[in-house]
Amino acid sequence: MNLRALKTLVAVMGVLLVAGVVGLVVAIAMRVAHRAPPPVAAFTAPPVTLPQGAKIEAVGAGPDRIVLDVVLFDGTRQLIVLDATTGRQIGTIPLRQD
């Protein structure tokens, strides 16, 4: 191998080494700058009281409401509406068939 090829090879490897170090520094800087937000604090909601013998059939959620579709012991249905932020019961909607 002649001296010219060796000098070229050393120069190329030097450039690759510098590029790798720069890439590593950029990756570390990006991770430090874009840290994940802290987790949302957990909350405890008051218990939801279901009527005796009732079973939750389905659950639906919106941006600020949670709706429980409940089947009562006598076969009728009722929707229980909860506030999603506090977990408190807002109201109930009885469902009847005509």
Image (cartoon, helix red, strand yellow):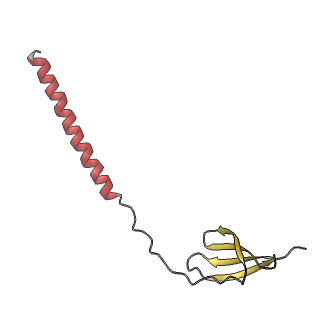
The count of marks equals 0
Q: Quadrant of residue 89?
A: bottom right
Q: Residue at x 81, y 79 (%)?
A: 74
Residue 30 percent across, percent down from the top left:
32, 53
At a point 16% along the width and 24% down the height, the residue shown is: 9
Q: Quadrant of the N terminus?
A: top left
From the viewer's perspective, tell me whether residue 6 is left or right of residue 90: left
Q: Is residue 71 left or right of 17 when viewed as pictured?
A: right
Residue situated in front as seen by the camera: 65 or 51: 51
Left or right: residue 5 versus residue 73 is: left
> What's the residue at 19%, 38% (across, down)?
18
Please, is residue 26 above or below residue 61 in the view?
A: above
Q: Position of residue 52 (x, y in %)?
A: 72, 84
Q: Residue furthest right?
A: 98
Question: What is the quadrant of residue 65 in the picture?
Answer: bottom right
Q: Name the image quarter holding residue 73.
A: bottom right
Which of the pair 57/36 is nearer the observer?
Answer: 57
Q: Residue at x 35, y 60 (%)?
A: 35
Left or right of 62? Residue 51 is: right
Query: Toward the viewer: 11 or 57?
Result: 57
Question: For the view shown, which residue lies furthest in the left direction?
Answer: 3
80, 25: nearer the viewer: 80
Q: Position of residue 21 (x, y in %)?
A: 21, 43
Against 35, is 45 above or below? below
